[in-house]
Image: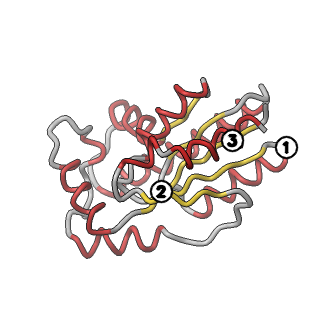
């Protein structure tokens, strides 16, 4: 079953949680950028924002490298991150070359709601330190970053999901569309 689900979207939209829900539901392996970044941060360390951003880029490159190897097994996979256009272009190219069907789940939400959710996350003492070296705690910077991350890309099969609340994680219409993709 050559299926690739890409979960992308806004910061604080619930991407990682949703990827884990879908992974359990379908028995599909998932690669989460944040988990890889946490491992890199613990092992390599960082001392400033630029080094932290390098960890993010390295985590995505590891995901893409693993995708190339994993795809040889012809098994379904989920990739989750706030992907940038150039990263998605690489992933789409690999999937097309290998004959994988791709479904993109794009989680977006009201910027005020996401900003408040983001602030709660960075204020959480249990949040991994690698996610806390950001200047996005200022609302205008958060909105600017998220807005810049909402770009056009060439995806044939996409579901736009309103992540203003987390009801989408149990929304039967959305889950039916994902079921249809997985089972077709």
Foreground label between 2 and 3: 2
Q: Which residue is mark 3?
A: 4
Label 1 sits on residue: 99
For marks 2 and 1 on the same chain, the one whose residue lies earlier in the sequence? 1
Looking at the image, residue 147 sits to the left or right of residue 157; the answer is left
Count neighbours of disc 2 (C-alpha within 10 A) and say few if under 14, some if 14 to 19, many if 20 or more: many
From what the image shows, is residue 70 above or below residue 169? above
Picture quarter containing residue 119? bottom left
Q: CA distance from mark 2 to mark 1?
A: 25 Å
Task: Indicate the position of residue 84 as horizontal and vertical percent values.
Answer: 54, 61
Q: Nearer the viewer, residue 43 or 72?
A: 72
Check if mark 1's residue and mark 3's residue have beta carbons within 8 Å: no
Q: Quadrant of the N terminus?
A: top right
Q: Nearer the viewer, residue 19 or 90?
A: 19
Query: What residue is at 41 percent from the left and 38 percent from the top?
Result: 17
Disc sitting over residue 34 in the figure: none
Say which quadrant the C terminus sits in.
top right
Residue drawn where x is 61% and y is 72% of the image? 152
| Foreground of the two, 51 or 56 | 56
Q: What colouring style does the render use?
A: secondary structure
Task: Determine whether the residue tagged by mark 3 lies in a helix, strand or loop.
Answer: strand
Q: Which residue is mark 2?
A: 107
CA distance separating discs 1 and 3: 10 Å
Residue drawn at point x = 56 percent, y = 49 percent: 173
Secondary element at tag 2: strand
């Amino acid at each position: 079953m050559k299926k690739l689900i890409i979960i992308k979207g806004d910061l604080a939209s619930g991407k990682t949680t949703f990827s884990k829900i879908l992974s359990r539901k379908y028995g599909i392996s998932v690669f989460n950028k944040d988990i890889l970044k946490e491992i890199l941060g613990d092992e390599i360390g960082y001392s400033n924002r630029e080094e932290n951003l390098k960890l993010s880029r390295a985590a995505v490159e590891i995901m893409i490298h693993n995708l190339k190897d994993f795809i040889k097994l012809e098994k379904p996979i989920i990739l989750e991150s706030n992907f940038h256009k150039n990263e998605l272009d690489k992933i789409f190219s690999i999937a097309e070359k290998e004959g994988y069907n791709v479904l993109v789940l794009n989680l977006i939400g009201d910027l005020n709601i996401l900003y408040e959710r983001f602030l709660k996350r960075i204020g959480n003492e249990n949040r991994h330190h690698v996610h806390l070296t950001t200047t996005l705690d200022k609302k205008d910077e958060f909105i600017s970053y998220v807005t810049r991350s909402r770009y056009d890309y060439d995806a044939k099969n996409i579901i736009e999901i309103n992540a203003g609340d987390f009801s989408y994680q149990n929304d039967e219409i959305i889950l039916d569309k994902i079921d249809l993709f997985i089972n077709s």
